Image (cartoon, grey):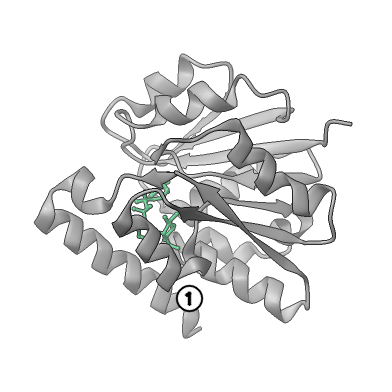
Amino acid sequence: MIPLLTLIIPAYNEVNNIERVLDVVVKMPDFQQIVVVDDGSFDGTYDKIRSYPVESIRFEQNRGKGAAIWAGVQQARHPYVMLLDADLIGLREVHLRSLIEPVVYGDAAMSLGLFGTGRLATDWAQRVAPALTGQRVLRREVLTSLPLIESARYGVEVALNRHVRQSGLKVAAVELDRLTHQMKEEKLGLLSGFKARMRMYWDIMRVLIR
Ligand SMILES: O=c1ccn([C@@H]2O[C@H](COP(=O)(O)OP(=O)(O)O)[C@@H](O)[C@H]2O)c(=O)[nH]1
Ligand SMILES: O=C(O)[C@@H](COP(=O)(O)O)O[C@H]1O[C@H](CO)[C@@H](O)[C@H](O)[C@H]1O
């Protein structure tokens, strides 16, 4: 039986990346709904999204990853939600099915997809901080019961982790073989990428201390 699943992809200036992800997901029968949220991009990401058979939401201005996910959740019609980043490299259907499995067919409330044998730098980053991953499947009510994520920006993942832990719900980690993503320094250049990374850590800290 095919589960009732909404896929949400937040995207900010991903015109060079998002096709790699959309080309895979639009072919899969597993998603009854795909919502792609353009978080105020200025590089043509929205036009690219509109060329695919998906639902799209567009923000006039950048509001952060948490707000983009929250907008997708408001539009989600199904009991399960998958979250995916728009800049994945090497995505395959098998990755997505292995993320779905423990939540839809098992007893986990949330699955976490961890890069394995993708690229040294990104594998290492996820080994150090697996809880930051953007690849997840959750029961929709886990997301709707946490409006805090709207303002969390990059703190959205740690807010979700804390909520699931405090609610005593089960989490399943899944290794996603030969998957990686574009790092901030690759997207933006060394200096701007590093600054964006520091802003991301700040978003995460803000959520952790509140
Ligand atoms: O303000 C933002 C920043 C990021 N993203 C999206 O959130 C995902 C993860 O962001 P990013 O790739 O910057 O994180 P990284 O994987 O480099 O940590 C990607 O799909 C981004 O396009 C977003 O929607 N709004
Ligand atoms: O893995 C990480 O350390 C960070 C940063 O990744 P890169 O150093 O840009 O490969 O990326 C993740 O963390 C963000 C905050 O939780 C998430 O929003 C991203 O989806 C995730 O890739």
Residue depicted at 54% across the width and 33% down the height? 92
Image height of 102 relative to 201, above or below: above
The kind of secondary structure element at disc 1 is: helix
Count of marks placed on residues: 1
Q: Kindly identify the residue that appears in the image at 49 percent across and 67 percent down.
A: 130
Is 131 rendered above or below residue 112?
below
**Outermost residue to the left:** 191
The answer to whether residue 94 is left or right of residue 67 is: right
Depth check, front residue: 131 or 163: 131
| Residue under the image location 81 percent in, 36 percent down | 4
Q: Residues within 10 Å of mark 1 (few under 14, many from 20)?
A: many
Query: Which quarter holds ligand 2?
Result: bottom left
Quick one: which residue is furthest to the front in this view? 117
Q: Position of residue 170 (x, y in %)?
A: 76, 69
Residue 101 horizontal/vertical position (percent): 76, 47
Asked where in the image residue 196 lies, by quadrant, the reply is: bottom left
Check the image and report above or below for 21 versus 82.
Answer: above
Residue 70 placement (x, y as % from top left): 59, 51
Residue located at (78% from left, 78% from top): 168
**Which residue of the protein is positioned furthest toward the bottom in this rendering?**
209
The answer to whether 92 is drawn above or below residue 198 in the figure is above
Q: Where, by quadrant of the figure, is residue 191 drawn? A: bottom left
In this image, 209 relative to 199: left or right? right
Dividing the picture into quadrants, the one containing residue 39 is top left
Depth check: 57 or 133 in front? 133
Is the CB of mark 1 within 8 Å of ligand 2?
no
Q: Which residue is mark 1?
A: 207
Q: Quadrant of the N terminus?
A: top right
23 sits to left or right of 74: left
Q: Amino acid at mark 1?
A: Val
